[in-house]
Amino acid sequence: MRIVTTVDGAVYIDDVEPRMLLVHYLRDRLGKVGTVVGCDTGNCGACTVLLDGRSVKSCSVLAVQADDHAVTTVEGLAQHGDLHPVQEAFHENHALQCGYCTPGMIMATVDLLTENPAPDEAQAREALEGNLCRCTGYQNILAAVLDAARRTREETDDTRAARENAGGAR
């Protein structure tokens, strides 16, 4: 089947088998290896990507279901060489050990902060409950999520202030 999908801002036109999973399309066809194959059953969340801005486990989505949709992978978060605030928060809060779950955790966090820019710890835990980590005990991950929320709010406030200042200079 022919699909047209936007992945990390680039448009791809491809012929895929109807049974190909999105995770395999991203990794094997497009080289987006930051999307990790974990359990292949939708339990671990390591393969989480954003589909039209909402987190999905790409091992549970067929590539043909991404036809005419936008996919964002962990590689697509960084802009112009700058890490996304969530990526920065995970790095600076040491929210990983082996790193296998990290891409999925980051993508789930981006989705959470889109829906709720100021989550409390309970809301962060609930948002990440579909993502498993076998190394960290989750404390640094939760700290990173809450730090990312703060960074994202500050970035939004700074952007808004810059726009207002630019508008006032006219």
Image (cartoon, helix red, strand yellow):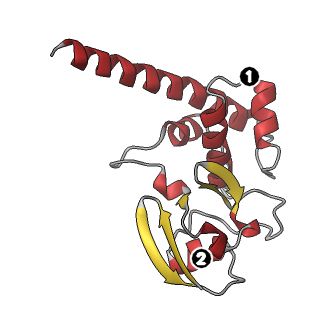
Position of residue 31 measured from the top left corner of the image (x, y, whole percent): 50, 74
Q: Is residue 156 above or below residue 18?
A: above
Confirm or deny contact between disc 2 and disc 1 (CB under 8 A). no
**Along the viewing direction, whichever of 50 and 142 lies nearer the viewer:** 50
Spatial distance from mark 2 to mark 1, Cα to Cα? 35 Å
State left or right for residue 165 relative to residue 45: left
Q: What's under tag 1, amino acid-wise?
A: Asp
Lower position in the chain sequence, tag 2 or tag 1: 2
Quadrant in the rendering for residue 125: top right
Residue at the disc numbered 1: 120
Q: For the point 35% across and 16% down, which residue is it? A: 161
Camera sees residue 119: yes
Residue at the disc numbered 2: 25
Q: Which quadrant is home to the N terminus?
A: bottom right
Q: What's under tag 2, amino acid-wise?
A: Tyr
Q: Which quadrant is home to the C terminus?
A: top left
Which mark, by number, is residue 81?
none
Q: For the point 82% across and 43% down, which residue is it? A: 129
Q: Is residue 27 above or below residue 139?
A: below
Position of residue 163 measured from the top left corner of the image (x, y, whole percent): 30, 22
Q: Is residue 163 above or below residue 50?
A: above
Camera sees residue 101: no
